Amino acid sequence: MTTQALLQVLASGLLMGLLYALIAVGLSLIFGLMDVVNFAHGDFLMVAMYAAFGLWFFTGLDPLLAAPLVTGLLFVLGALAYLGVVRFAMRARSNAGMVQIFATFGLAITIQGLAQFLFTPDYRSIGQSWLGERTINLGGLFLPLPQVYGGVVSVLTFAALYLLMSRTDFGKALEATREDQGAVALVGIDRNRVFALGWGLGAALVGLAGAVLAIFYYVHPQVGGPFSTIAYVVVALGGFGSIFGALVAGVIVGLIEALATTILPPALKSIGIYSLYLAVVFLRPRGLFGRL
């Protein structure tokens, strides 16, 4: 492999890794806030992709302009998922962890079933968009514009998330609730309100990723499955509940996937990712930056 080809592979892996990080960070945020794994996370991504596709199909709105609308829609969906499902699952007095798992898993099946009923299992894609099927040449590296856009959006989102968590009252309330749920009630912070907003924020982040992904990826009811699996690997590698860890781990996973694709047949490209996951489980269960 030439140096130019290697740089091309690494650049592609970096861009996809940043998008994986954006998909995973909402999952990590919710786990860090509530110790709940959202098994409907991939289906939230699917809903966001269908929303971006629907806005383009019915109104001609480009996914770049639709992204804020999709993000807001997913914020509402995430908050409603907590208020309508997760809040009641958390009240279980025995086997609370299993109840929460089955509640979010049931939510995932419901969303996926509704998508199949409403839209059929057919694959759909956004035919024309401002960035679709366009590339840029950076010193001999040919990079697809949708992935470049996704990488830039991911970096800016993580920067905004850092400012939100460190500079705003809402971010401080989230962090305080992460540290001690009982203590925040004593100072007048409504834990349920924080949880609902946290779920909304986590869903909004994956909604933004879905709006980006819909530009260059097929939309269908099962589209969230592979991405949610990668998101779980990213969260495990970066550390459960670590936002910065999700960014670093997403980049690592993207680079490993890209390198594995050049060495192995395309059908086996995921072996590198899941081998990494097994290594993390055995050697460092809490991940690179986790606090378990």
Image (cartoon, grey):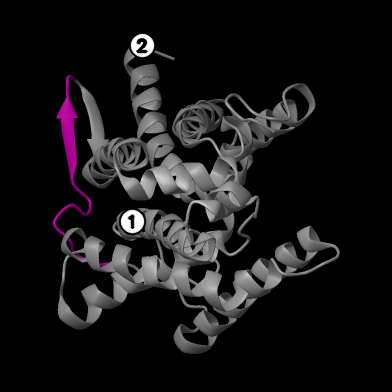
Report the predominant secondary structure element of the magenta stretch: loop
Looking at the rendered image, the quarter that the C terminus falls into is: top right
Up/down of 71 relative to 3, above or below: below
Q: Which label belongs to residue 208?
A: 1
Q: Position of residue 43 (x, y in %)?
A: 53, 66
Q: Which label belongs to residue 71?
A: none
Q: Residue at x 37, y 53 (%)?
A: 209
Numbered disc 1: secondary structure? helix
Q: Position of residue 283 (x, y in %)?
A: 76, 21
Say whether residue 159 is left or right of residue 228: left
From the viewer's side, name the closer residue of 7 and 54: 54
Q: In this orientation, does residue 160 appear?
A: yes
Up/down of 69 relative to 132, above or below: below
From the viewer's side, name the closer residue of 192 and 213: 192
How far, Cα to Cα, is label 2 from label 1?
34 Å
Judging by the rendered image, the residue that carries numbered circle 2 is 3
The residue carrying pointer 2 sits among few (fewer than 14), some (14 to 19) or many (20 or more) residues within 10 Å by Cα, namely few
Up/down of 193 relative to 144, above or below: below
The residue carrying pointer 1 sits among few (fewer than 14), some (14 to 19) or many (20 or more) residues within 10 Å by Cα, namely many
Q: Position of residue 88 (x, y in %)?
A: 66, 74
Q: Amino acid at mark 2?
A: Thr
